[in-house]
């Protein structure tokens, strides 16, 4: 929990332009405040998948699931997020093999998959 507090402010301004990093834009389900959270976002057939790297149930995932929508910036492109859904270890099959191997080795077991369309 401490690591994101220090890393996120450094990564936030550049993450949306350096894939696989991305910035998820979401609204707090309790506070109603807007948040921008850097994550690693990997493309899937209909959107992207992001790992729960620092927590078993991160606030960004809870917020996206609760609202059912959000936005993402990745590679300088802006996306509209829909249909967020939680995955367990089956999410490993959607990741590039080297990334899946790394996630497995560091004990990451939870992921958020979501549909995404380029925002015009």
Image (tube, rainbow, N blue to C red):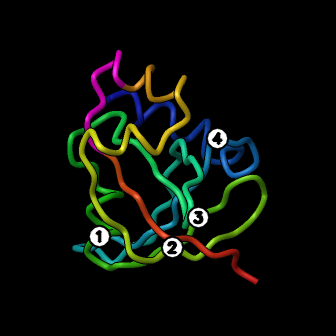
**Pointers 2 and 4 in contact (CB under 8 A)?**
no
Q: Say which of 77 and 94 sits in front.
A: 94
**Pointers 2 and 3 in contact (CB under 8 A)?**
yes
**Pointers 2 and 1 in contact (CB under 8 A)?**
no
**Pointers 3 and 4 in contact (CB under 8 A)?**
no
Quadrant (top left/top right/bottom left/bottom right) for the N terminus: top left
The residue that mark 4 highlights is 20
Give, as a single range, the part of the protein colored magenta.
Answer: 104-110
At 55% from the left and 67% from the top, the residue drawn is 46
- Label 1 sits on a secondary structure element that is helix
Up-down: is 68 above or below 39? below
What mark, if any, has residue 81 been given in the picture? 2
At 26% from the left and 35% from the top, the residue drawn is 109
State the CA–CA distance, disc 2 to disc 4: 17 Å
At 51% from the left and 40% from the top, the residue drawn is 8
Q: Say which of 101 and 72 sits in front.
A: 101
Q: Nearer the viewer, mark 3 or mark 4?
A: 4
């Amino acid at each position: 929990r401490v690591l994101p507090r220090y890393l996120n402010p450094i990564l936030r301004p550049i993450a949306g332009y350096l894939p696989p990093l991305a910035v998820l834009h979401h609204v707090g389900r309790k506070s109603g405040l807007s948040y921008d959270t850097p994550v690693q976002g990997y493309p899937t057939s209909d959107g992207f998948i992001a790992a729960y790297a620092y927590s078993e149930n991160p606030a960004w995932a809870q917020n996206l699931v609760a609202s059912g929508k959000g936005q993402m910036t990745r590679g300088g492109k802006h996306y509209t997020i829909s249909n967020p859904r939680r995955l367990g270890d089956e999410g490993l099959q959607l990741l590039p093999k080297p990334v899946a191997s790394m996630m497995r080795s560091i004990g990451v077991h939870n992921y958020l998959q979501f549909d995404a369309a380029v925002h015009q």
